[in-house]
Amino acid sequence: MNLFDIIGPVMVGPSSSHTAGAVKIGYVARRLLGEKVVSADIGLYGSFLATGKGHGTDAALVAGILGMKMDDDNIPNSLKIAKEKGIKVRFGKADIKDAHPNSVEIKLVGENGRQLSIVGESVGGSLINIAKIDGLDANFSGDFPTLIVHNQDQPGHVAEVTGMLAEKSVNIATMQLYRANRGGNAVMVIECDQEVPEKYLEWLKNLDGVNKVTYYSLIEEGKNEF
Amino acid sequence: MSFKKLSEITAISEDKKIPFWQVILEDDMKERGVTREESMKTMGSMLDTITEADAKYDESIRSASGMAGGDGGKIETFRMKGNSLIDGFILEVIEKAVKMGESNACMKRIVAMPTAGSCGVIPAVLLTYIKHKNVERERIIEALYVAGGIGEVIATSASISGAEGGCQAEIGSAGAMAAGALAYLEGGGNEEIVHAAALTLKNMLGLTCDPVAGLVEVPCIKRNAAGAVNAVVYSQMAMAGVRSAIEPDEVIDSMNRIGRLLPSCLKETGQEGLAITKSAEKITERLSMSWQ
């Protein structure tokens, strides 16, 4: 927390958790997908489901998916904008259990067919946690450049990834490891102090035993898509 | 964010012979690794945003629930008629506080200071002050640092979240921050600033968070006016030389203990208080819309 978490943030109301945090979850999901969204399946849970309508959580999530930030004047118009863009948006009840009270499951399909599913939690103020990516645990805040590597659970992958980061002078802020089962699918979530160069992401994608590389960059993509 | 007590800020201020606001500025420069100009520019943009939000208030719009909107316009019309019991500064503070709270409920851009639910308190006091007094922009920005410093201490040693500490933590904290800022603008030093904050917070202790249908509307919006007026009342008392009998940092500690003792049914869960009245149930029922 810093001074401008107290005098700030600048946001579109009414709620830092149900509106501003929801925009951020949608935004991170869009950035993780890495391409224009053609359809979004949004499942709400807990307090998001119960009070989301009145808090504009629906508009906020879609605004984020369109690439808007939490202070964008257009947030209340996002559902209309999505419709005009031909983006299919469907809301429902999330099929998840024992999650944080402000949770949402977002399934996105991109223009090139890329798919992504996340579970996001709005944890207070406008802070968020991305709890799952494609069904595997993740847990990151969206406040750092974040590298997510899905790999086979076998020796050496952590060393390969961290070695690459060390070589490029990228400092690791936090690092988490999860696996579904021994020798099965595993995931590394690494929050970094610096951005990871694009060509090393490509290199990583081609490594044996690496199934998928997802990267969340703090560098703006430029203007919104609408 | 390094301050746990108001007395830490005033001690540095006295040691280094710099004003309260500058202690907060220098701490921000260190904390975020920014220059003085960068920090003050960011704070200036907060002032610009609240100024714009106030100017853009639209009395014709309503919130998604239909509960909020239009009251700020009513108060303005009433004030313009000139037949009110109170006039001038205070009535305009009330009007601006309600307007900002309504704008927030209607999905307009605001500054959470310290929270979205309490976003009307500090702007109401500062923007009315700008309108009625010949004051330089720089000084208002300095006053925002004063408010921020008080808010930091409360956030660190108690809470600024209604779900954690009840409404005392939101409107109460915003009131204390606004009171300190106003005392500074009126020429108060450290003593006046911390006592204005303490006196204001003392009078909001125990306030519950029991909003109707879980929305930041009822009673939040109108309570912004209470927080803002409280700030004016107690900063004036502090300027008159009145002091809190309880040390300011002890008032914040009390708020923290009271917040913990408040049952969770009164902390933003919608299970008690105003949220379960017949009137509230009717509204909640009307709002239970389908997501399909």
Image: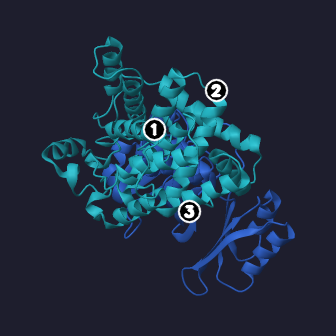
Chain at tag 3: B
Tell me which corner region of the image, top left, top right, bottom left or bottom right, holds residue B282: top left
Q: Residue B4, labelled with which disc? A: 3
**Mark 3 residue type:** Lys
Residue A100 is situated, as x and y percent measured from the top left of the image, at: 41, 65
Residue B42 is situated, as x and y percent measured from the top left of the image, at: 67, 40
Q: What residue do we see at 27% from left, 35% from top? A: B67
In this view of the protein, which residue sits in the foreground, A135 or A193?
Answer: A193
Q: Colour of chain A?
A: blue
Q: Residue B240, labelled with which disc? A: 1
Left or right of residue B122: residue A33: right
Q: Nearer the viewer, mark 1 or mark 3?
A: 1
In this view of the protein, which residue sits in the foreground, B236 or B230?
Answer: B236
Circles 3, 2 touching at the beta carbon (< 8 Å): no
N-term mark: 1 or 3: 3
Q: Secondary structure at mark 2?
A: loop
Residue B279 visible? The answer is yes
**Mark 2 residue type:** Glu
Q: Name the residue that disc number 2 marks.
A: B136
Q: CA distance from mark 3 to mark 2?
A: 30 Å
Q: Residue A36, labelled with which disc? A: none
Q: Secondary structure at mark 1?
A: loop
Residue B262 is situated, as x and y percent measured from the top left of the image, at: 30, 63
N-term mark: 2 or 1: 2
Q: What residue do we see at 53% from left, 45% from top? A: B193
* Vertical placement of residue A66 versus B103, above or below: below
Q: What residue do we see at 56% from left, 54% from top? A: A29
Are discs 1 and 3 both within one chain? yes
Q: Colour of chain B?
A: cyan
Q: CA distance from mark 2 to mark 1?
A: 24 Å
